[in-house]
Amino acid sequence: MTNLSIGDLANTFQLRRFTSESKSELARLAKELTTGLKADLGAAVAGDFGPFAGIERSLRANEAYKTANNEATSMFAGAQIALESVQSITRDLSPALLTAASARDRTLVTTTAVDARQKFDAVVSRFNTQIADRAVFSGSATDATALASAPEMMVGILASVSGLTSADDIEAAVDTWFDDPGGGFAASGYGGASTDMGPMIVAEGETVEMTVRADDQVVRDTLKGFALATLVAEGILDGDVEGQADLLERAAMRLVAADGDVTTLRASIGTAEQRVEEAQARNAAQASAYELARGELVNADPYETATMLESVYAQIETLYTVTARLSALRFSDYMR
């Protein structure tokens, strides 16, 4: 029988190689046990990165949808808060206007009209709401202010009613100023775009849109009510308490009618908000599923890893023991 052996130098190199491999394996297992991830992704997916790449792409897309959902949620929430505030102001002013109109008292009429002017400013401010430096009610022109200030609009409205002496004519002139597509409000009151804000992608193949703009008829009708009452504060029909009281009554009726339409606008926004919430729920469920699928590919089993770590550690200890024994051998010990 032929015995094969290796020399001392070769044996030394062989032991060093075994030691190096065992240490590398020990470091790999320790890393996997610490991070919970497989150190060699290529081996984990058997060289086929297609499924892993697909999962990663889906997770990145899901993150993008999450950002879009947050932006859409903020935009719609801002619109709801603004419209709710407009309704609150309107509902606070309408009864006061009717009371002043019924009393026909000069002081009460004037005081209420001044209050209406201040509330006109507040309402315009609400329609100029911005979220993250984007105008909510300016349509696609999100970098533009939706409405001119109330005093600026009143300059044009006062010019349109100049010389008029009856409540009917004044009301008609105010209607014309707000509704004329070629001038008045369209030219100097509304600063946004005539197109809606672009659709916001909230899920794969699904978008939502913000379709409420400050040039909507509902908004204009609301502003008409405030403008009619503000005209009294600006001195229209000065000395004619009956005529001024009539204007306040008409303003109140305009505001009461517009309030219901604002509720309809808020309902349409609420529908869009619900779609965003549903998309968020679906995206969250999909993200969890993708995370689990990725985990099956890249996560290391902690029990299996710990067992292998103990095994490699034992091998290294054995290797060190054998190396120590071999290094202690001397030929002279066998020649005595």
Image (spheres, rainbow, N blue to C red):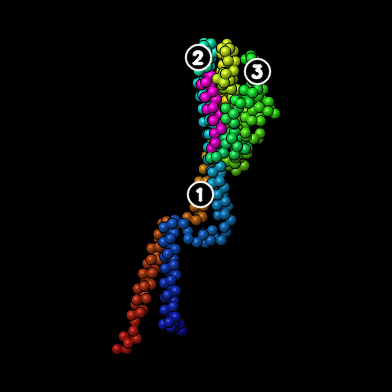
- Distance of mark 2 from mark 1, alpha carbons? 70 Å
Residue topped by disc 2: 107
Q: Is 309 colored magenta in this rendering?
A: no
Q: Quadrant of residue 205?
A: top right
Residue at the image point whose x is 55% and y is 54% from the top? 52
- Residue beneath label 3, please? 163
Horizontal side of residue 106 vs 20, given as left or right:
right
Between marks 3 and 2 in the image, the one whose residue lies nearer the viewer? 3
Residue under label 1, please give it.
291
* Vertical relation: 42 (above or below) 82: below
Mark found first going from the N terminus, 2 or 1: 2
Snapshot quadrant of residue 161: top right
Which amino acid type is marked by label 3?
Gly
- Residue type pointed to by label 2: Thr
Residue type at numbered disc 1: Glu
Q: Earlier in the sequence, mark 1 or mark 3?
A: 3
Q: Nearer the viewer, mark 1 or mark 3?
A: 3
- Please identify the quarter of the rendering in which residue 176 is found: top right
Disc 2: CA contacts within 10 A as few (<14), some (14-19) or many (>=20): few
Q: Nearer the viewer, residue 302 or 58?
A: 58
Point out the image quarter for the C terminus.
Answer: bottom left
Q: Nearer the viewer, residue 206 or 51?
A: 206
Q: Observer-nearest residue: 254 or 304?
A: 254
Which stretch is magenta? 112-131
